[in-house]
Image (tube, rainbow, N blue to C red):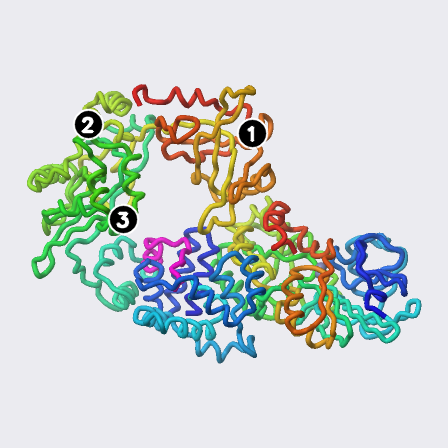
Amino acid sequence: MNRFAALLDRLAFEHARNAKLRQMADYFRTTPDPERGWALAALTGALSFRHAKPGLIRALVAERVDPVLFGLSYDYVGDLSETVALLWPEGPSPRAGAEKAQNAPRLSEVIKALATLGKAELPGQLSRWLDALDETGRWALLKLVTGGLRIGVSARLAKTAVAALGDKDPDEIELVWPALEPPYVDLFAWVEGRADRPAVRDPAPFRPVMLAHAIEEAELAALSPADYIAEWKWDGIRVQAVAGRRADGAPVARLYSRTGEDISKSFPDLVAALTLPGAIDGELLIVRDGRVQSFHVLQQRLNRKSVTPNLLAEFPAHLRAYDLLADGEEDLRALPFAERRKRLKAFVSRLAQPRVDLSPCVPFSTWSELMAARADPAAAGAGADAEAIEGVMLKRRDAAYLPGRPKGWWWKWKRDPFTVDAVLMYAQRGHGKRSSFYSDYTFGLWTDGENGDELVPVGKAYFGFTDEELLQIDRFVRRNTVNRFGPVREVVHERDQGLVLEIAFEGLQRSNRHRSGVAMRFPRIARLRWDKPPREADRLETLERLLPPDA
Amino acid sequence: MRPEDLLCPTPQGLCCPAGDFFIDPLRPVERALVTHGHSDHARAGHGAVLATAETLDIMRLRCGEDCAGTMQAAAYGETVEINGVRITFHPAGHILGAAQICVEWKGLRMVVSGDYKTAPDPTCAAFAPVPCDVFITEATFGLPVFRFGDARAETAKLLHSVALFPDRAHLVGCYPLGKAQRMIALLREAGYDRPIFLHGAMEALTRYYAARGLDIGALRPAREARRDELAGAVTICPPSALQELWARRFPDPVSVFASGWMRVRARARQRGIALPLVISDHADWEGLTATIAATGASEVWVTHGEEDGLVRWCEMRGLRARPLRLVGYGEEEDEEEDQGAAAENGAAAAP
Ligand SMILES: [Zn+2]
Ligand SMILES: [Zn+2]
């Protein structure tokens, strides 16, 4: 447990992807089975046990530490697990570690015990573990048992680190992953070349997705229109819908996100429509009365935690299919796209489910024709669905379905995002690893007020900036606070003093919830304009001109 | 006689009216006793200074030859009398030359700790508690969350990272006086024998430590190194340099910070530190509380740091304790801190 804790500790501070990979690969290389397998399970979120409540931890520490000293410490540190880990009494000879290290529980012991322990036994077991672990071990243990283990590593990254042990492609691991179980002894044996590849028994496996490169208008000239098929680029979420049969003949259907996360539970309505064995690549959309709704509507369904009958009725999930990876047992990925598209068309009509339809092709013979279609999808056959279109996709007719982002086969030609220069007005602390930074920003534009020009808030952004820019903005916020309201700081925003942010966004709607009367979609910080005085930021009228006429 | 008659806290620092001197005065005075060379304790402009020979050397190095009217050296354990007050300097284990100052008058013994640590440190004389009636202690890390493990284990973390990332430069932020030299000594003790690169700000002080007998091995100025030489090597620099343009010329740098503050994760995260090393030149909670007990003092005054925690501990043990809330200490380390961040953490975090 102490070694795993040391890894988590290092990962928690590391920002760079490659460095995280190196740390994990080093751990997997030097840690024996089954410990490393349980660590992999923890990193990929494959563990499930009932989490301990913070109250339990507080009660444990209250038996051992003066409440005043605990209060002062918690106040200082700001995180319960960390505070308790740091001040847990270490006994008479705190620095004689050798004997203690022998008593430290192994990660596998902890995980097995957590899965089986009764509620009444947990506190006693927890304090015995805390007695036996070092500071980092206690911290990791408390994060694990309270369910607060967030260390900025995705399941994909952890699998990539495993792949690095034996020069495997992470996609190969994705293929066998659904059939594996912790502690993954067979996986490590295969990756290290000591055993055969584990059998893929999953009847409805995820297949690594193929991604497109962005393309600009100028680059199109080098391509021949005849080599490509164009489709609309839908503004929903990319999913893979897979159905199959178990060995006993029972049907299985699953919906995966583009990273391979099983999201079936959130979309039972759509999963029920996957009645034909095969694997469809497509876009999840909300369709009401035969009309695709904007992403804004889809987001309302995504935001709800519990899937209720009301939710299903109000936001019916729909799959717009654009590729077929498997038809029954047959793997189609090596076929050219034009061929797969024919098979897809036949598959969708055989399936005959109203919730699943074919994403249409956009006919064109020259790039300028396609450009016109992209600029005005409604006129180019998309009709009322145009609101949910964010550009066009170009796919080479002869492209096999290749995992990852291979160059030269698939292109996305997005509509350009809109940008405005806005002024930072308020900042709020973020969550998780950003909890000590001001990372949520409210920005405003100029408008006519009672006393001349004033700034009116038009939106919030909390992404788009680099880690370094975050530090810069954070420092600016701390040094230029004019008011505090709880976690929110008002930041100086005068004509000649303040920070101008270039905000990029995908679209605009009227909104009664905002004082400005407009709401942006996906607002994000495109650039920090330290060079620009706030008085030169944009006006609300500029934004209003971008509103669709009938919206 | 009350202890306040012998030493009393004033805005200029601790004053001894009977001896007509101040200890670590914050502003220029006629006669000063100085515990150690950090700039928040050793300020320029006093009429006469009494300190250890090393502290006097460090003051001359940092503030110039004429930083005080006269300078008198005091050896550890030797007693000097000023206006009838008996004064003895004892090792504080904080940095080279650091001393606790014991003041005795009319049968009352008071010890001013200055900054101190009880953990081993090859760069300076080891701390020993001095029996007294009133102990005046620092409390930089006066909360039970501050428990510093073995500095050698932290050094091992650094060396593991150097081995794991042979293509990246390791920039280790260290306070230029004391921490930098201790870090070098720790690396040598761990068997690291490659050249260590140094930021210009710590060259003179490190040379002084070497002249006083510290084995520092091969050192090279970082400014003269080629980029490829810095990959996989250790460079010691002031903590503030980690965020400066200076750090950009290093290949894919890993930012490391060796400080007691690194015990708290949010502190490391706030500064963008990728590898925090918990190595402190101040006593941790165990060190502070064990020392108070070992002095046998019945009364404790707390000069600066997390006074509330330590005062609470004393009260729980039936010791009279008072926070002096002296403003101005702790800045040697704090001058590196982002002012905005320090203000943000408010009273709870301000050292
Ligand atoms: Zn000091
Ligand atoms: Zn100090």
**What amino acid type should be assigned to the residue bearing mark 3?**
Ser
Task: Identify the residue at horizontal 83%, vertical 70% (top origin).
Answer: B103
Residues B13 and A163: in front is B13
- Residue B91 place in picture, x, y as percent: 75, 71
**What amino acid type should be assigned to the residue bearing mark 2?**
Val
Q: Quadrant of the C terminus of chain A?
A: top left
A254 horizontally vs A56: left or right? left
Q: Chain of mark 2?
A: A
Are tags 2 and 1 found on a single chain? yes
- Residue A382 place in picture, x, y as percent: 20, 26
CB at disc 2 and ligand 2 closer than 8 Å: no
Please give the label number shown on residue A441. Answer: none
B73 up-or-down from A511: above or below: below
Cα distance in 3D space between marks 1 and 3: 46 Å
Q: Is residue B286 magenta?
A: no
Highlighted magenta segment, given as a residue range: A144-164
> Label 1 neighbourhood size at 10 Å, few (<14), some (14-19), many (20+)?
few
Q: Chain of mark 1?
A: A
Q: Which residue is mark 2?
A: A362
Q: Which residue is mark 1?
A: A531
Residues A212 and A447: in front is A447
**What amino acid type should be assigned to the residue bearing mark 1?**
Asp
Identify the secondary structure beneath mark 3: loop
Cα distance in 3D space between marks 2 and 1: 43 Å
Q: Which residue is mark 3?
A: A306
